[in-house]
């Protein structure tokens, strides 16, 4: 399993702890929320909102999340969540009922959050209703014996070890203080894991519905450590794992994912701060009818990235892209035979030369995806500095735009994320 | 003496700075390429880097060339610092795990040492 680093930066806490005044933009924002809630909530729910009891949390990705309490209820347990993106657009809203506490906070056992959550739309349509076991919202997981302490395996999470509720501690002369943080934005069925964790007990676990006025909340962004370098993997050994699951009755999918260089800006071809042109990778998945799951996330890389600048053919390698960031992805169900065709394509093209304009990571992923019957063509663009005749090149930006178009057209298999999400795990090599 | 003059020459300073091979697992190349491309989009490291190069080159034609060259050198270091420190998890330093990129970086460090020695000598003479 790749190393996951919890980065709880002091700077984020610092910025998220700023006291804010009710400025004009705040007033406009509040008016916008009031208008939305009036249109969407039932009359009884709207009448019960305590607009003097508001809690704002600034997101590291831009935008903010507002929690509003109900009159007579503890805002820590019953509240409305409204998310606004960096452009000022309200992207999602819902109602949350949350109860629970941190277990074993002061003994040798590892503390964790246990409780229950119910998240629904503003019209009270349940999106998530689940117990929270050791921080994991169990309805988002499928039981898998032997993984982690609680035996969970999530559909869409970085590595299936990060719970939706995490517990932090702080030390002072008076002892240890515990805090719990939750990825509320993952609870409304948006189809992705949010790495923005908001403090649950921001009033010290007590308090409740009084308060009044706007307060600023706390958010921590849990980020994954990007690999400094990608070691080459033996693609064939990764593919061999699929042979361990019988084809008869197996469920197979293939996913193509796009990580654009600058989140939210599919028009940018490079992120010069990170020397990244973005990335495209694929996930092959097979679940046997009698049990057993194999999932492999792989991508195509230059063997020596500094040689890419020449624009010529250079040696390539296949990298394990487990937990890789993505901004859009497209998944299709395939037959075992189609999956095998994709596996054959991986084995064939894994030794193909890398060329930034004629055969890059996007070309590899598309070739494999289409070998499985994906039938996907994406718009080609001329990469600045690396023109490819009059046709242009396949790029993560082109894939992102294509998936966005599919999503807009109502294709449920196409998923885009305003910010970013992370892919699943890889089983690794099999002999 | 001749050897030291060559290794501390402003032109060699610019060249050693420009050819450092940097990049992420996805893309890399000489630092001057990054400066050129990023300058068009207004990145800080690129602006500092191009100013550093210009200051160093101008030092060839000015009487107080040693101090100008020192200024250029400090700006070059600042440019590289911004470039490496601003990247997510030091991805920009990814290529330095390979021998040739590492040698280009070490070459620049050697040039820094010789330029520094030259400046210290100048200061002592004054």
Image: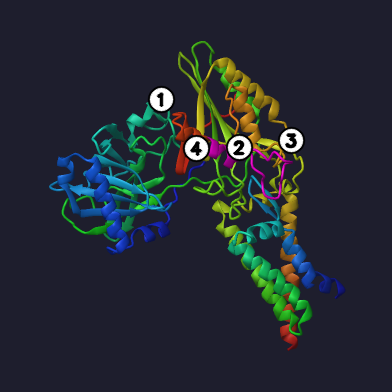
Q: Where does the magenta region start and end?
A: A380-402
Residue A262 drawn at (x, y percent): 54, 49
- Residue B114 spot, x, y in % from top left: 76, 71
Instruction: Work out whether residue A391 or residue A248 is closer to the camera in this orientation and state it.
Output: A391
Whichever of callouts 2 and 1 sits on the residue coming sooner in the sequence is: 1
**What is the CA distance from the residue labelled 2 to the residue labelled 4?**
12 Å
Where, quadrant-wise, is the C terminus of chain A in this rendering? top right
From this view, report whether residue A416 is shown above or below residue A83: above
Q: Nearer the viewer, mark 4 or mark 3?
A: 4
Tell which subunit mark 1 falls on. Answer: A
A28 vs A102, nearest the viewer: A28
Identify the residue under disc 3.
A353
SS for tag 4? Answer: helix
Mark-to-mark CA distance, 2 and 1: 40 Å
Q: Marks 1 and 2: in contact by CB < 8 Å?
A: no
Give the labeled residue for mark 4: A404
Side (left or right) of A273 relative to A390: left
Can residue A393 be found in the magenta stretch? yes
Q: Pointers 2 and 3 in contact (CB under 8 A)?
A: no
- Residue A66 picture location, percent across and down: 29, 50
Closer to the eye: label 3 or 1:
3
The residue that mark 1 highlights is A144
Closest to the camera, between mark 2 and mark 1, is 2
N-term mark: 4 or 1: 1
Let me know if marks 2 and 4 both belong to one chain: yes
Q: Residue at x 58, y 42 (%)?
A: A397
Q: Residues within 10 Å of mark 3 (few under 14, many from 20)?
A: many
Question: Closer to us: mark 2 or mark 3?
Answer: 2
Nearest the eye: A416 or A245 = A416
Counting residues from the start of the chain, the first of labels 3 and 1 encountered is: 1
Q: Secondary structure at mark 3?
A: loop
Residue under label 2, please give it.
Answer: A379
């Amino acid at each position: 399993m790749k190393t996951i680093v919890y980065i709880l930066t002091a700077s984020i806490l610092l910025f998220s702890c700023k006291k804010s005044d009710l400025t004009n933009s705040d007033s406009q924002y509040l008016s916008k929320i009031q208008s939305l809630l009036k249109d969407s909530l039932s009359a009884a729910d709207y009448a019960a909102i305590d607009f003097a009891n508001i809690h704002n949390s600034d997101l590291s990705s831009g935008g903010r999340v507002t929690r509003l309490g109900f009159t007579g209820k503890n805002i820590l347990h019953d509240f409305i969540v409204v998310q606004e993106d960096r452009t000022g657009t309200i992207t999602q809203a819902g109602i949350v009922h949350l109860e629970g506490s941190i277990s074993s906070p002061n003994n040798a056992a590892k503390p964790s959050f246990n409780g229950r959550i119910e998240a629904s739309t503003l019209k009270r349509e349940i999106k998530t209703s689940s117990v929270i076991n050791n921080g994991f919202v169990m309805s988002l997981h499928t039981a898998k014996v032997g993984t982690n302490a609680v035996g969970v395996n999530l559909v869409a999470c970085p590595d299936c070890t990060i719970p939706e509720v995490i517990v932090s501690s702080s030390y002072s002369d008076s002892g240890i203080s515990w805090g719990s943080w939750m990825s509320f934005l993952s609870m409304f069925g948006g189809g992705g894991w949010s790495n923005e964790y908001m403090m649950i007990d921001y009033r010290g676990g007590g308090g409740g519905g009084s308060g009044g006025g706007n307060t600023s909340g706390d958010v921590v962004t849990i980020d994954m450590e990007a690999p400094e370098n990608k070691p080459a993997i033996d693609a064939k050994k990764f593919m061999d794992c699929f042979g361990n699951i019988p084809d008869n009755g197996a469920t197979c999918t293939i996913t193509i994912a796009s990580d654009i260089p600058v989140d939210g800006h599919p028009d940018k071809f490079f992120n010069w701060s990170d020397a990244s042109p973005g990335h495209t990778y694929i996930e092959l998945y097979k679940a046997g009818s009698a049990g057993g799951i194999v999932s492999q996330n792989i991508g195509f890389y230059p063997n020596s990235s500094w040689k890419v600048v020449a624009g010529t053919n250079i040696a390539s390698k296949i990298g394990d892209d487990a937990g890789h960031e993505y901004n859009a992805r497209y998944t299709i169900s395939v037959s075992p035979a189609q999956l095998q065709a994709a596996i054959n394509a991986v084995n064939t093209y894994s030794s193909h030369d890398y060329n930034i304009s004629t055969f890059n990571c996007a070309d590899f992923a598309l070739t494999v995806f289409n070998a499985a019957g994906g039938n996907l063509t994406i718009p080609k663009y001329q990469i600045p500095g690396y023109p490819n005749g009059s046709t242009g090149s396949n790029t993560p930006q082109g894939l992102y735009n294509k998936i966005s178009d599919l999503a807009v057209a109502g294709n449920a298999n196409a998923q885009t994320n305003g910010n970013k999400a992370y892919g699943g795990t890889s089983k690794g090599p099999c002999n | 003496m001749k050897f030291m003059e060559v290794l501390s020459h402003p032109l060699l300073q610019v060249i050693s700075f420009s050819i450092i091979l940097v990049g992420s697992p996805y893309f890399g190349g000489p630092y001057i390429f990054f400066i050129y491309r990023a300058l068009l989009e207004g990145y800080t490291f690129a602006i500092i880097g191009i100013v550093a190069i210009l200051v160093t080159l101008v030092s060839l034609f000015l009487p107080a060339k040693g101090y100008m060259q020192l200024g250029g050198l400090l700006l070059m270091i600042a440019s590289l610092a911004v470039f490496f420190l601003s990247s997510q998890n030091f991805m920009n330093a990814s290529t330095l795990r390979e021998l040739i990129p590492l040698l280009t970086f070490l070459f620049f460090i050697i040039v820094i040492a010789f330029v520094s020695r030259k400046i210290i000598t100048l200061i002592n003479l004054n």
